[in-house]
Image: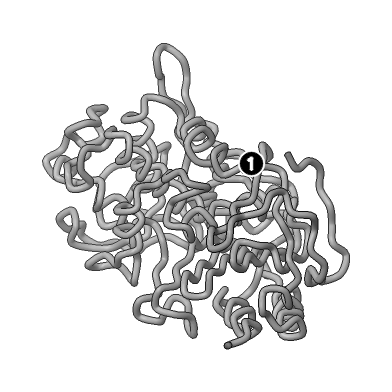
């Protein structure tokens, strides 16, 4: 298991291959074992080292303007409900090509909040629930299996799992002291929504963390255990992730479960808490999705679910099941229509391009993550 933190003082493309942890059979995708990830030189994989170095230099030179001490958090997102670190890392990232590490830069071991990348992780947990029969059908109303009062009203009773995953639920109510209507600068910061009349479930897309937090609680109900435990046992352990990540609840987001308080986690760090993780574990998570939800011969996330999750919703801005898509070429300009991403504020991003067998983690940067990805892709030699 990786331990400790290491700061790379200068931008560097990995030009020498580390010893292989194991040899993958010809034609079989490489899956990194726990505690190590094989590095290969760009040239060994048919990449142009100079162009890749240019891409890394570009990424390192474009750091976010977000405060390093999180002092802008409340102004941006409103009154926090949970913990925040006292500092963050500088911009950093990892490039995985054909399964191997070809580049890394910055302090990739630093455990930081990854904001709304946690939404894509919630989507993965929902896929596990579907795999295990805890959710019978994504088109089924959530209230048929979750009966804690959150879906008791006629309006909320019609909401399906799929609508939650597409952020088209129009769920009415409050979670952990925050209202789904998102009105009020003090409570919600610069991201407050303007007043509007709610529509029927499934009729309107709205990026809404209160509703995502309701989805997270609903998933806790069907698993009957905290989601961090599910995520660790069903996803992170099987893919060989470290033990440094943590899914931090709000101070008040606990429910009683079997006579004991259980944390209900959030789908972001809008109000503190959220998924705190390093770039390597983010890369493993992205690589799981690049491989269609499979890892070393084990289908962790059902293939049908992965396909559905990467299909645009009817009303969203090219949005799947809590994943940003690029079928219209707008979310990730210049990348293939098949590319998709987990995007978090800051910015903390995982960009995946199946067409290029590529996963890129880029954290605390300025601008669209496609700008870095395009430069990496330009380094892939065309045969």
Q: Residue furthest right?
A: 9
Which quadrant: the N terminus? top right
Residue 197: x and y in percent read 20, 59
Q: Residue 46, relative to residue 18: is it above or below?
A: below
Residue 347 shows in this picture: no
Q: Residue 3, relative to residue 379: is it above or below?
A: above
In which image quadrant can residue 275 be found?
top right
Q: Give the number of callouts.
A: 1
Residue 336: x and y in percent read 44, 80
At a point 46% along the width and 33% down the height, the residue shown is 230
Q: Nearer the viewer, residue 13 or 160?
A: 13
At a point 66% along the width and 37% down the height, the residue shown is 243
At a point 36% along the width and 55% down the height, the residue shown is 306
Q: In the rendered image, which residue does mark 1 sit on? A: 245
Residue 323: x and y in percent read 41, 61
Which quadrant: the C terminus? bottom right
Q: Residue 264, relative to residue 120: is it above or below?
A: above
Residue 192: x and y in percent read 42, 60
At a point 75% along the width and 51% down the height, the residue shown is 109
Q: Residue furthest top?
A: 259
Q: Nearer the viewer, residue 201 or 76?
A: 201
Image-based side of 19 in relation to 210, left or right: right
Q: Residue furthest left?
A: 154
Q: Nearer the viewer, residue 377 or 125?
A: 377
Residue 251 shows in this picture: yes
In which image quadrant can residue 242 be found?
top right
Q: Secondary structure at mark 1?
A: loop
Image-based side of 212 in relation to 16, left or right: left
How many residues crowd around disc 1 within 10 Å: few (fewer than 14), some, or many (20 or more)? many
What coloring was used for the rendering? Answer: one colour
Q: Residue 84, relative to residue 101: is it above or below?
A: above
């Amino acid at each position: 298991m990786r331990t400790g933190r290491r700061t790379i003082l200068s931008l560097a493309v990995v030009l020498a291959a580390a010893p292989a942890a194991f040899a993958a059979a010809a034609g079989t995708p490489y899956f990194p074992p726990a505690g190590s990830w094989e590095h290969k030189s760009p040239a060994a994989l048919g990449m142009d080292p100079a162009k890749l170095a240019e891409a890394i230099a570009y990424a390192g030179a474009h750091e976010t303007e977000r405060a390093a001490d999180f002092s802008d958090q409340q102004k941006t997102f409103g009154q926090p409900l949970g913990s925040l670190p006292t500092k963050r890392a500088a911009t950093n990232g990892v490039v995985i090509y054909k399964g191997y590490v070809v580049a890394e830069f910055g302090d990739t071991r630093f455990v930081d909040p990854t904001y709304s990348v946690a939404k894509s992780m919630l989507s993965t947990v929902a896929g596990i629930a579907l795999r295990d029969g805890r959710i019978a059908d994504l088109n089924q109303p959530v209230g048929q299996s979750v009966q804690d009062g959150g879906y008791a009203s006629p309006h909320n009773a019609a909401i399906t799992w799929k609508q939650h995953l597409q952020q088209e639920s129009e769920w009415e109510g409050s979670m952990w002291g925050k209202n789904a209507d998102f009105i009020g600068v003090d409570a919600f910061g610069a991201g407050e929504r303007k007043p509007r009349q709610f529509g029927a479930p499934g009729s309107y897309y709205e990026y809404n963390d209160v509703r995502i937090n309701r989805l997270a609680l609903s998933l806790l109900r069907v698993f009957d255990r905290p989601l961090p435990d599910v995520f660790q046992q069903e996803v992170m352990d099987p893919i060989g992730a470290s033990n440094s990540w943590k899914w931090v609840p709000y101070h008040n987001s606990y429910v009683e479960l079997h006579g004991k308080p259980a944390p209900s986690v959030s789908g972001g760090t809008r109000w503190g808490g959220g998924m705190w993780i390093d770039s390597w574990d983010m890369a493993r998570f992205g690589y799981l999705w690049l491989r269609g939800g499979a890892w070393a011969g084990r289908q962790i996330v059902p293939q049908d679910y992965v396909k559905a999750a990467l299909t645009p919703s009817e009303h969203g801005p090219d949005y799947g099941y809590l994943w940003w898509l690029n079928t219209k070429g707008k979310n990730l300009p210049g990348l293939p229509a098949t590319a998709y991403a987990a995007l978090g504020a800051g910015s903390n991003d995982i960009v995946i391009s199946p067409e290029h067998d590529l996963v890129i983690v880029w954290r605390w940067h300025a601008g669209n993550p496609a700008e870095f990805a395009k430069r990496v892709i330009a380094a892939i030699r065309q045969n």
